[in-house]
Image (tube, rainbow, N blue to C red):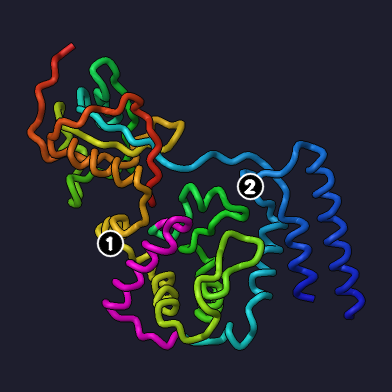
Amino acid sequence: MRLVKLLIGVLIIAIGAIVVVRRAGMGGFSTRAEPSAAERLLARYARRAAVPSAARNAKNPIPFTAQVWADSRAHFADHCASCHGNDGAGKTELGQGLYPRAPDMRLDETQHLTDGELYWIIENGVRLTGMPAWGTGKSDDEDTWKLVHFIRHLKDLTPEQLDEMSALNPKTPAELKEEEEDRKFLEGGDVPPPAEPDHAHHHQQ
Amino acid sequence: MKSLFLSAALALGIASAAFAHGGNDHVRGVVTQVSPQSITVQVSPKVTKTLTLSDKTVYKRGAKAAQLGDVKVGDRVVIDVPEKTTQAVEVTLGSAPVAKVAKK
């Protein structure tokens, strides 16, 4: 049985190597490419395999309260939304430029993960993706457990809560300047319209 | 075995197909025309821009929700538009008094 698994693994690597060589000859690689179904399947398997079984079965020790909900929204807006978006859909410039894409965490693919798996992924990251390790790897980080609650309640976010989160998103000096100009303009201030009407503005969904 | 599959995932993690750039354009101007289907704003003395409205377009005045009916000619607005499209996804209305817009 062990030999069969080994052979299957070698076969997968061989196929992968062929794909790599062919792609390289066809003009290189780009993260703009859409991951294939096989890649997504393998990546999901690899992600699941990376979590120790003891960690997978861990239960969230933090009770869900209104304060936890508020804390987790603020934390997520500041640390996670640049890639995942405030609503967890992953429809951000960074999230959609990653390979694989930042997932829509509202969907079953993420919601079917156990609390322990979500915690582990936040704490330890996911290799070969854009997901970094945010914690120390210990199992008792309250802020991380609060984020697990946040992910579980993504579908409960209201437009008002999303607006509050937008105000907490990290911003570049250029974005802050643009926001200030927008505010002045909307209040009737004498802000000249931009010479180029279509200047880029990267906002969180 | 886990590391074997991780290696396989790495090897296969490099296939391709094109994908659009993200981010939104930001259009700031004064409303010159508005209908349920579109909104036209003057973005500079000689430039106007017409954007498409839909059921999914979100309207706001400050932090409060607004609606299409709140948008009047002469209003100052800031509109979020996905790059390379003319679809208005969010229209933020100003609090300034409505400006007089010369009829064409």
What's the residue at 14%, 27% (across, down)? B74
Asked if the stretch drawn in magenta spans residue A15, the answer is no
Quadrant of the image occupied by residue B69: top left
Q: Which mark is residue B93?
A: none
What's the residue at 44%, 42% (across, down)? B23
Quadrant of the image occupied by residue A53: bottom right
Q: Amino acid at mark 1?
A: Gln
Seen as rendered, the residue at the extreme front is A173
- Residue B46 location (% of width, % of height): 27, 15
Q: Chain of mark 1?
A: A
Question: Depth check: A15 or A197 in front?
Answer: A197
Q: Amino acid at mark 2?
A: Thr
**Segment tinted magenta in the rendering:** A60-85
Q: Is residue B69 visible?
A: no
Q: Which residue is mark 2?
A: A31
What's the residue at 23%, 43% (across, down)? A180
Q: Which residue is mark 1?
A: A161
